[in-house]
Image (cartoon, rainbow, N blue to C red):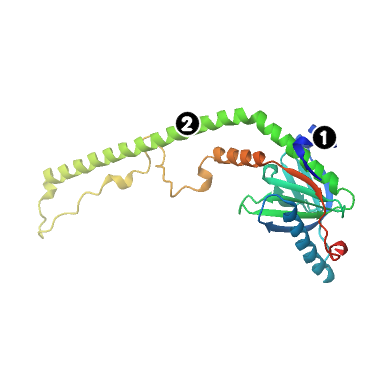
Amino acid sequence: MNRAFSRKKDKTWMHTPEALSKHYIPYNAKFLGSTEVEQPKGTEVVRDAVRKLKFARHIKKSEGQKTPKVELQISIYGVKILDPKTKEVQHNCQLHRISFCADDKTDKRIFTFICKDSESNKHLCYVFDSEKCAEEITLTIGQAFDLAYRKFLESGGKDVETRKQIAGLQKRIQELETENIELKNKVQDLENQLRINQIHTSPSSTPTRNGTQPPPVPSRSAEIKRDLFGAEPFDPFSCGAGDFPPDIQSKLDEMQEGFKMGLTLEGTVFCLDPLDSRC
C-alpha cells in the first residue's frame, strides 16, 4: 500500500499542528542501526537495508548485546534520535532530507526512513523496532513533513528577499575591498617614489668614511597594520570559516530540492527470511 503524504485521504493526521510546530512528539523505540543505501526511495531499497541490519543485530544478540533503546523527538524541524537517559542527540535528521518512510505490515514493530546525510550527502536508511507505535511514528513523520513544507512555502518570500539583500551587501563589500586594495597600492607607490627622491636628494646619500653607503631608509609599508578605514586589511586566506556570512542561497536551494522530492509514506512487507522474525 503506497500512499503519498500529501494525498492521504484514508487517514487523518494524529496530532495538532501546534504540537509539531511549537513542541515535539516523543516516542521510545529500539534502534537497529543505519546503513548506506544507493537510492533515496524504494521498497526494495529498505527491504534490503532492514534484512541487513536485522541480521547484524541477530549476530550481536547472540553475543549477548542488547538492542539499544532510543528516544525519537519528531517536530517540523526534524527527527532527533537521543539517548533516553542522558538526552544526548545521536542523530539529527532534518525533514527536507528525509525522502522515504515506511512501516512493515507483516512485522508491525518495524519502521524505517531514508535520510540524506548532511556531511557525506550519502543516503542512509535508519531502522527501528517499536512494539506498538511503528505505524503511528511513520504517520507522525509524514505529518511533520507536511507542516514543514507548508511553513517553508509561507516563509519562502521573506527568505528570498533576505537572500537578495544579503547578496547585495556581499557584492558591495567585495567592491569596497577591491577599491581599498587599489587605494593602498597607490599609496604604496607614492611612498616608494617619495623614499627614492629622499635618497637621491639627501646628504646622507654620500659615502661614509669607510667608503660604504649607509643603509636605506626602511619602508613605511611594514608599519601599516590597518587599511584606510582603520580596520585590519581583509585576507581571505587568514579568515576562518566563521568569518564568512552564512550561505543562505545554498541552504534554501537544498531545502527546496528536498521538499520538491517529497516524502513517500509506505506500508509494505520487509520480512522474507525466517531469521528476520527472531531478531
Q: CA distance from mark 1 to mark 2?
A: 45 Å
Q: In which quadrant is the C terminus drawn?
A: bottom right
Q: Which mark is residue 121?
A: none
Camera-nearest residue between 121 and 91: 121
Q: Can residue 33 be seen in the rendering of this structure?
A: no
The number of discs equals 2
Q: Crowding near pointer 1: few (<14 within 10 Å), some, many (20+)?
A: few
Residue located farthest toward the front when viewing the structure as drawn: 1
On residue 168, the disc is 2
- Up-down relation of residue 146 to residue 32 (above or below): above
Question: What is the x, y in percent for residue 162?
Answer: 56, 30
Q: Secondary structure at mark 2?
A: helix
Name the front one of labels 1 and 2. Answer: 1
Q: Quadrant of the N terminus?
A: top right
Q: Judge whether residue 191 can be spotted in this image.
A: yes
Q: Position of residue 114 (x, y in %)?
A: 71, 50
Q: Quadrant of residue 187?
A: top left
Q: Nearer the viewer, residue 189 or 205?
A: 189
Q: Which residue is mark 1?
A: 9
Could you tell whether 144 is left or right of 277 in the image?
left
Hey, what amino acid is under mark 1?
A: Lys
In the picture, measured across the screen, residue 83 lies left or right of residue 192, that is right
Which is nearer the N-term, disc 1 or disc 2? 1
The residue at 73%/47% (across/down) is 100
Give the crowd class for mark 2: few <14, some 14-19, many >=20 residues within 10 Å: few
Secondary structure under the numbered disc 1 in the rendered image = loop
Q: Amino acid at mark 2?
A: Gly
Q: Report the residue at 80% width, 36% height from top.
A: 8
